Amino acid sequence: MSSRTERVAGPACMAAWGAALLVLFLLNRHYDLAYLPGWLAAFGRALIGRPPIGTDGLLQSSGGVIVACLVVVAWWGLGSLSFRLLLPSAALGSRALDWSTRALLGAGAWSTIWFFLGLAKLYHPSAAVAAVGVGLGLAVWAWRNEPPAPTGEGPRPRLATTLIVLVLALGLLAAIAPPTANDALMYHLALPKAFIGSRSLGEVPYNMASYFPLGVEMHAVWAMLLGRVGGPRMGEAAAGATLAAFGPLVVLATYGWARARRLDRAWSALAALGVASIPSIYFVVAGQGVDVAVAGYSALALVAAGRWWATLESRWLRLIAAAVGFALSTKLSAVALIVPLTVAVLLRSALIERRGRSPGQPSAGATVMMGLGCLGVGILLASPWYIRTLIWTGSPLFPLYSTLWPGHAPGWDSGRAELLDALLQVYGRSSNALDYLLSPFSVSILAQPELPRHYEGVLGPGFLIGTPLVVWAFRRRYLDVDLRLAALIAGGMFVLWLLGSQVVRYLLPAVPPMAVAIAASAAAATVHWDPRAGRLLRGLLLATAVANVLVVIAWFAELNPLQVVLGGETRSEFLSRRLDSFPYYETINHDLPPGTRVWLIDTQRDTYYLERPYFADYLFGTYTIAQWIREAGNAAEVRARARALGITHILVRHDRLLDYARSAVVDDAEPRALNLERLEMLRVFFFQGTRLVQGGRKFWLIELPG
């Protein structure tokens, strides 16, 4: 295609491509935008129907945000010192990138410190206050030595900035509300609460998530310890706000990365908006998740990798090592970052071998040794988490990859391990070559929230719209070497994601580099195409962001956390309308006698709100009862086994367990008569000689006989 034809056809093709994907995206929002008018109406009625603000609740929420701000400033303080040690006299090229890098480095360093404080059984408010004091002192010292901020050029992109602030504010409001997301109730906040109760980083019986790397959850421990001075609700809000802080940091890092690549404010803001507006970014932030933190550390690693590739200066390897280590300390899925970085190191060495080295450059062999050595240092930095799990279970990867490296812990066996492996394969739509080929379209357009077969989230159309633009700029060499490398690594991460568990939030680390590459490609198109192409491409990227923001607004309106954050709605009222099990937990906590031990059956082990001793299966909440029913001769044997474990009460999700079509005790491979016999045994176990303490259409709280 001639350059004249390209200048004419390029904008027209992009306009048609973008418009088609936008329409398809909006038409496919069956589970959110279709309900937006009704959710907004209910949201408005709730605000009008009662005073939206209550003094006590507002003070608790505000106090939690203030605590989180202190923690983040402490991150920046220690991160500033770490930055000086890792990259003396280095310039990242952007104040936004510089500040976000310091905060992320500080968060990783403090996380490691809190790991060892937990091993020393020092989870105490005094330790949290001392840590904040040290962090604030370092921040003051760094601020006094901070050079003046450079003067920005160009007008401020008001619409993009407004949309960024809007989605980040909605995420923060949802994050400081009482938690309702499954993972937060099971471990992101439930484990920090348990660690504080024992004052140590110990095993939490029957909760396999306690063996995961929990680097970001350490900040929830820190924030809870500080916030609880003002009450449990303030500690809860502080933990949520602290985890939510990784969202703005990732957005700031994306903006700073674009500015460092010499993009103007408008294109840089669009890159940042492309990240901030992703519905799954909001979902993770609002749900007190950790995957956005992995995206932040991945972005730092790729920024440093680009600088190292271009200059071969060893100081950038130190930043790569730190970023890789902190990413692996957050989640094992960060391995998807290490593989393409390893390939990049080998390719850089091969280029030196092929072209010869310039004066002052290391040899090909030295390049390989230094590059792989830096990745090894990163793994070593994260290793305390995996060594701890190895000592406790016999496998550093426990409970994952049981066939590769089996591990053992109370409440876990080979049957549960097989179920977990099978569960991880449920996510996503890819089962054949065509599915894999269409996966970018599926994850961008067809994906839906909280539906495993639909990736349990959605990216939105922006990245799919921008990918052809990146391919064009890549082929024309309009992207500098840093962004070409970042785009290739992001593509490699996507391929690795396809080969694993296809959950959208596991793909988020590939988002910042693609956002910057798309913005840079669009900026190049404005120069090499018709001048009007710039307005067209800006309009397309803004339109995709607006579509994403509408989805975020729908999710926020459905949750409706504003009143509980402002204090107009009590914590109990909010949780009672969001969690069907919460009223039963209230009865267990306040009405049952001392010595109570509750067996949770089919409740997903969401134990954050439970204050009494309990027994529960991890993730597979019907595993034990199904096994016992299959092994027992009658209901009395099941009851005797339960009483032998000290169980006095049962909280059961009966609507599924007693439904033949959905029950875990039914095995379709066995005769129907046998399955009916097992269901009858289960009914006898629940009803014969027991007392129904509280019941409803989903749950029963049952007292077992002595």
Image (cartoon, grey):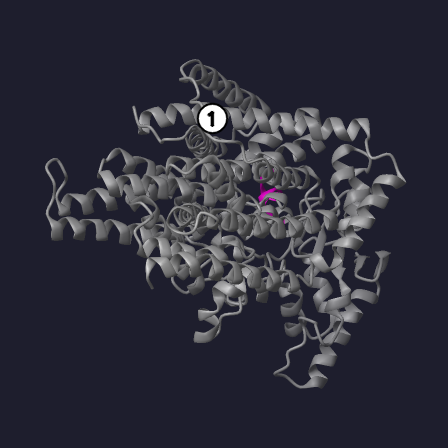
Q: Is residue 359 magenta?
A: no
Q: Main secondary structure of the magenta part?
A: helix
Amino acid on which disc 1 is placed: Trp
Q: Which residues are magenta?
A: 186-192
Q: Nearer the viewer, residue 131 or 276?
A: 276
**Which quadrant is home to the C terminus?**
bottom right
Relative image position of residue 271 (x, y in whole percent): 48, 44
Q: Is residue 187 magenta?
A: yes
Relative image position of residue 533 (x, y in whole percent): 47, 50
**Which quadrant is home to the N terminus?**
bottom left
Q: Badge 1: few (under 14), some or many (20 or more) residues near its Cα, within 10 Å?
A: many
Location of mark 1 (residue): 76
Kind of element beneath mark 1: helix
Q: Nearer the viewer, residue 122 or 455?
A: 455
Q: How many marks are shown on the rendered structure?
A: 1
Relative image position of residue 54 (x, y in whole percent): 82, 30
Q: Residue at x 77, y 42 (%)?
A: 594
Relative image position of residue 118 (x, y in whole percent): 50, 34
Q: Is residue 315 left or right of residue 436?
A: left
Q: Is residue 385 visible?
A: no
Q: Is residue 678 visible?
A: yes
Picture quadrant where residue 300 is located: top left
Q: Nearer the viewer, residue 166 or 414?
A: 166
Q: Residue at x 40, y 56 (%)?
A: 7
Q: Is residue 46 above or below residue 616?
A: above
Q: Nearer the viewer, residue 172 or 108?
A: 172
